[in-house]
Amino acid sequence: MSILQDLDGPFPFGRTDLAADRLTVGARHTVAHFVRWRDRNQDAIAGHVDRYTRHLETLVPRSGLASAVRYRVLPRSRRRERYREIAREVNYFGVFNLGEVPDPALVAAIVDGFGGRVPSVTGILADLDGHRGAAGVVESLERHLPVLAEVPDTRWLGERLDRLHRILPESVVRAGGMGKAVRALAGVLVIGAFDTLDADPAARREHLARIVPAAYALGAAYVIVDDTLQDLPGGHVSPADRDWCHRAILHGLTTGEAVDVVGMPDHPVAEELHELYGMLRESHPFAEHRHLYQAAEAMYLAQHRDAARTVADVEAGGLAAMYPDLLVKAGVSRVVANAVGRRRLPDGALARCLNTILLGQFRDDLRDRDEDRDAGRVTPFTVPPDLLDADPLHDLFAYDAYVASEVFGGDPTAAETLVSVGAVKLANHLSADPGRAEELLRD
């Protein structure tokens, strides 16, 4: 990997950079720039970690008696604290999901407008009624996004989710595949709701109704491709059927043409993929949304390479050699969610989304370390430490600092948002099992 000589900074991705080859060039540049920045800015990284530590220290008193009394007895203190929490959630959603720092006036308007109930993907997932299946999912979406109750396609959405649950391999469902699909589609819908805050009710309904099918298609395709075709190479889909699916996916994303059903496997997963592609072509025609198809193709190819990677590959190429595919795989999913969920992508949003999301992949891989190791997946946190040339935990914090400094240009709101939310996520993960922190330090 090398830095493009005429470019100092993360790669400035735009619509013309979403083809697979351009995305790969850009991802390699950003990773190379990050590695150079990391090695030259150890003091800045240490300062960023210190901010994490200070923020964690502020969380501890909240569980004490004095804090509890102040929070419960003093309404004004309670309101201020809740306002700050909601503002952090909104800022984090903007920075991490939209690639922008929300205007403070917009944050205040959102907090006041929702009266303390800001819709979030995390909240929607936590509120799901697991005993009610697809109907519970749809009801949760409507509770958190009331405008959906007026969108006729929600009944259709429930039926599709129910069908998806029935056709997925049992092992994928047990491993949380439906949650992954719901998380992806909910992310698109929340982005759509956020994007239309300034619109009148009719325009909001129209926009949400338009993106529901594509949101479902993204979520369903994500779990079918990533968890079923890539992670489960045998036993559920035969090699011949899987090869047909791969060829059909690439042909469709490359050309935008209808898939030839001659020879299509008599398998519900293949049938679902065919229908998902039809939904995408109808809601986002190829000629008008070529960049969306290019991005999806690049993500698919990166998923394929990532699934085929071995420990020997990482040992030979070094830890950072993994990062470009991780950036593309995770980053393009966010780009696609924004391209589907938003009416228009602001200037610079693609670059900030793509260059930020590797941070989320680091956190996900740390959180899923035990599960990935048991499943034999190769991630930065499952490769034996003695085979690595760098420390993935250090790179997690270093990339956090890099995003704050280089992607968002040192914006104080972005930096504070990344630290405050990142500290809570890390604390929740480590505190759930006291042995996790000791194991990480030992490794």
Image: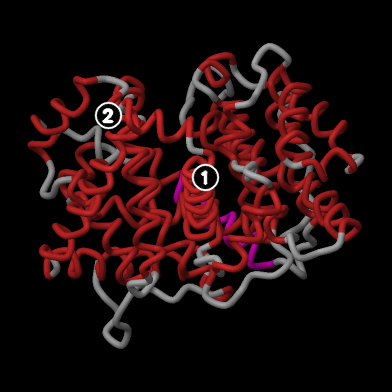
Quarter of the image with the N terminus in it: bottom left
In this orientation, which residue lies closer to the viewer: 24 or 441?
A: 441
**Residue that carries the numbered disc 1 in the rendered image:** 76
Question: As displayed, is residue 80 above or below residue 409?
Answer: above
- Disc 2, SS: helix
Residue at position x 35%, y 42% in the image: 363
Q: Main secondary structure of the magenta part?
A: helix
Badge 1 amino acid = Arg
Residue at position x 34%, y 63% in the image: 403
Residue at position x 51%, y 73% in the image: 17
In this orientation, which residue lies closer to the viewer: 114 or 45?
A: 114
Q: Residue 430 shows which numbered tag?
A: 2
Asked which quadrant contains residue 197, the reply is bottom right
Highlighted magenta segment, given as a residue range: 290-303
Question: As displayed, is residue 59 above or below residue 326?
Answer: above
Question: As displayed, is residue 425 above or below residue 351?
Answer: above
